[in-house]
Image (cartoon, rainbow, N blue to C red):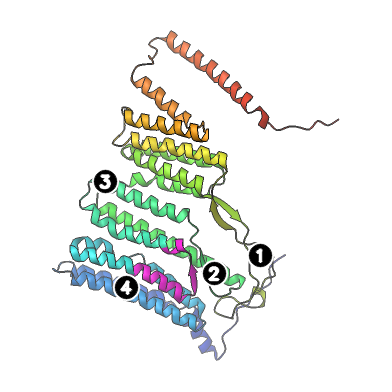
Amino acid sequence: MSDPPRTTPEPSGPYLHRLLYRWFVEYNPLYLVSAALVLGGGFAMSRELSGRAGVAGPLGVAATSEVYALALIGGAALLRRLELRRPAVMLAVLAALYQGDLTLHTEACVYMGVAGLVASAAWVALFAAKLAALAWAMGLRLSRSALVVPSLAAAGMAALPHLFDTADAARTTTLVAAWVFGVAAAVAWTPRRVESRAVLSPWQSIVFVRALRVTWALWAVLAALHVVFWSTAYPVQLSALLPVPILVATSRMRSERSVWLSVAASLALSGAVAPGFFYLTAAMACASLLLRALRAPRWSAGQVSATPAAVGPYRVDGSDVAAPGSRPPEPVLTFGPDEPAVRARLCTGALASGYLAAWTLGWAGGPWPEHLLWLDLALAAIVGLLFVRRRVRGPFVPLSASALHAAWRAHLVPAPATALGWGALSVALGFALLVGSLAVAWQLRRHAPRLSSTS
């Protein structure tokens, strides 16, 4: 059964007035032209002023961009007061776009000395203030994470360029990768709820969700562009960032098996393309497993309001007021601790990943590094404490693997030198796997599914 035709209310008045209303109120392209002109003018002025001494020129260009962003926020507030929601949303999205430091002001502050440090701090403070002002202008209610996560990302974007000048290639790459993973993980493992203070119709709710997704996507693209710019100006190895999306994707995976496969894939990828940063990937894997254990995703059915809103530039008419249950509700994502058994396994994996991160620090590929006695003793102490306090046996797996590898490296376990020796070792391993499998089957026999017999 097809949906009923949707008719958008036509503005009243002569045809020319209605045409102008459509072109320059609801679908006004001049907003985009205005934003492009200000951005292009800022770049032109910055190129002209780059060869001159002093900080007044770069600060003036940045101030112009910030004033224009504030003007966009004020314009969005005015249009919303006039019940012109569509153009208000357009200005709000443009204001969000200007939040991403389109003029590269944070990178330019590095060359301004003390004035640059002050300007960077002022930009971060103004970022948070504009975010709150934009929420007020559009009548939005931001959760704590929706306000804190972008502000922390902006703080890192402003601070990192000041650290690059005194860092070598390895440290610079580590700083960038840690910032990218931290921001992505904060986005992935927090709800970042944004709600409208006004009652929205079903169609307006759909447009509202789309506008939010566009905003977050724009910020992600702008952050990626800043990282690309850093890689051209500083010795940043972008291959070290390849495991980040794989690890962050575990925040939305429903299957524990997918989580383990993703962590293993990220470690293998790092060892293949960026072995010098394997320790960093292992540390990020440790954080991902801990976050997954403590903040597992849960989806619950949401509710769709059937209350009509005031007629505005969105497609609001009689067919827009849907009966309850006529449109599938948007699933609501929440986070909470995983099941105890799953949480124990994930924490064991986090312990093993943390051990790998500490063990491979400074490793750049080739044979595995020598074992560190203090690190192995620390791992043994943690495993023993977990067993005594919690009766957890899983951590004995990474401890046993570490002990066997250490014994192998110390030649306490002699390697076979002949075909006869390798054959005997293969036979022994085969028997060991058989006995171990039977022992596991005996231990887990009570959990086997019981089939009811039918006569």
- Of circles 2 and 3, the one toward us is 3
- Label 4, label 1: how far apart the Cα atoms are: 41 Å
122 vs 130, left or right, is: left
Query: How many residues crowd around disc 2 within 10 Å: few (fewer than 14), some, or many (20 or more)?
Result: some
**Is label 4 in a helix, a strand or a loop?**
helix
Residue at the image point whose x is 48% and y is 53% from the top: 189
Quarter residue 54 falls in: bottom left
Q: How busy is the neighbourhood of tag 4: few (under 14 within 10 Å), some, or many (20 plus)? A: many
Considering only order in the chain, which callout, 2 or 1, is on the residue closer to the N terminus?
2
Q: Which residue is mark 2?
A: 207
Residue ID for mark 4:
66
Residue 173 belongs to the span the image colors magenta: no
Task: Measure the C-alpha gap from mark 2 to mark 3.
Answer: 43 Å
> Considering only vertical position in the picture, is 227 above or below 309?
above
Q: Nearer the viewer, residue 51 or 169?
A: 169
Instruction: State the CA–CA distance, disc 3 to disc 1.
Output: 51 Å
Image quadrant containing the C terminus = top right
- Crowding at dot 1, Cα within 10 Å, few <14 / some 14-19 / many 20+, comes out as few
Q: Position of residue 209 (x, y in %)?
A: 53, 65
- Amino acid type, residue under disc 3 in the picture: Arg
Q: Residue furthest front?
A: 389
Secondary structure of the residue carrying numbered label 2: helix
Above or below, 261 relative to 23: above
Q: Main secondary structure of the magenta part?
A: helix
Judging from the image, what secondary structure is the residue with disc 3 in?
helix
Question: Along the polypeptide, which appears first: circle 2 or circle 3?
Answer: 3
Q: Which residue is mark 3?
A: 171
The boundaries of the magenta stretch are: 126-147
For badge 1, the amino acid type reads: Arg
Asked whether the residues under the numbered discs 4 and 2 touch, taking CB atoms below 8 Å apart as contact, a structural biologist would say no
